[in-house]
Amino acid sequence: MSRVGLSVLGGPVAFKLFLKEFCTDDDFTIDECVEKVFRKWHWLVGPIQNKTEISQLFHAVEQINPKVILEIGTNLGGTLFLTSRIATCDALIISIDLPGGIH
């Protein structure tokens, strides 16, 4: 079964569990978030990118502290989720994907 199929089957309950794990008062480091997304939640919001590359990217982006972040190609939303973890609370995050695309 495809990852997309699994994420649909996981549905709202799985997504609520995913959010509950990350939406706490605990501060997770970038590396902890990447590790959790790739190891535990990859079937729900797994990024397509290589784990090391995406970790390095988010460390670099965090240093820049952008006010606007644009993602093209959302897929399962893993990169979008990780982006939300490093963005400041006043940042604008935009994600663009094809309507009705395979992802």
Image (tube, grey):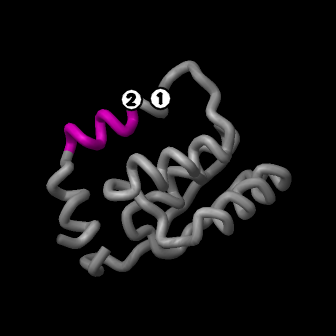
Q: Residue at x 76, y 57 (%)?
A: 61
Please state the horizontal and vertical placement of residue 18, each as a whole percent of the image: 36, 39
**Which residue is under mark 1?**
23
Image quarter hosting the N terminus = bottom left
| Left or right for 87, reference 81 | right
Marks 2 & 1, CB-CB < 8 Å contact: yes
By secondary structure, the bulk of the magenta-drawn segment is best described as helix
Q: Is residue 25 above or below residue 51?
A: above
What amino acid type should be assigned to the residue bearing mark 1?
Cys
Q: Residue at x 28, y 67 (%)?
A: 3
Mark 1 burial class by Cα count in 10 Å: few <14, some 14-19, many 20+: few
- What label does residue 59 carry, if any? none
Please state the horizontal and vertical placement of residue 94, each as a whole percent of the image: 54, 61
Please state the horizontal and vertical placement of residue 92, each as a whole percent of the image: 62, 51
Q: Residue at x 20, y 38 (%)?
A: 13
Q: Residue at x 60, y 53 (%)?
A: 83
Secondary structure under the numbered disc 2 in the rendered image: helix
Outermost residue, front direction? Answer: 39
Q: Is residue 76 above or below residue 2?
A: above
Q: Quadrant of residue 64?
A: bottom right
User: Residue 15 magenta-drawn?
Assistant: yes
Q: Quadrant of residue 103?
A: bottom left
What amino acid type should be assigned to the residue bearing mark 2?
Lys
| Left or right for 20, reference 32 | left
User: Residue 10 magenta-drawn?
Assistant: no
Mark 2 burial class by Cα count in 10 Å: few <14, some 14-19, many 20+: few
- Magenta-colored span: 12-19
Outermost residue, right direction? Answer: 63
Query: Label 2, label 1: how many angstroms apart (C-alpha)?
Result: 5 Å
**Which residue is under mark 2?**
20
Q: Is residue 49 above or below residue 8?
A: below
Secondary structure under the numbered disc 1 in the rendered image: loop
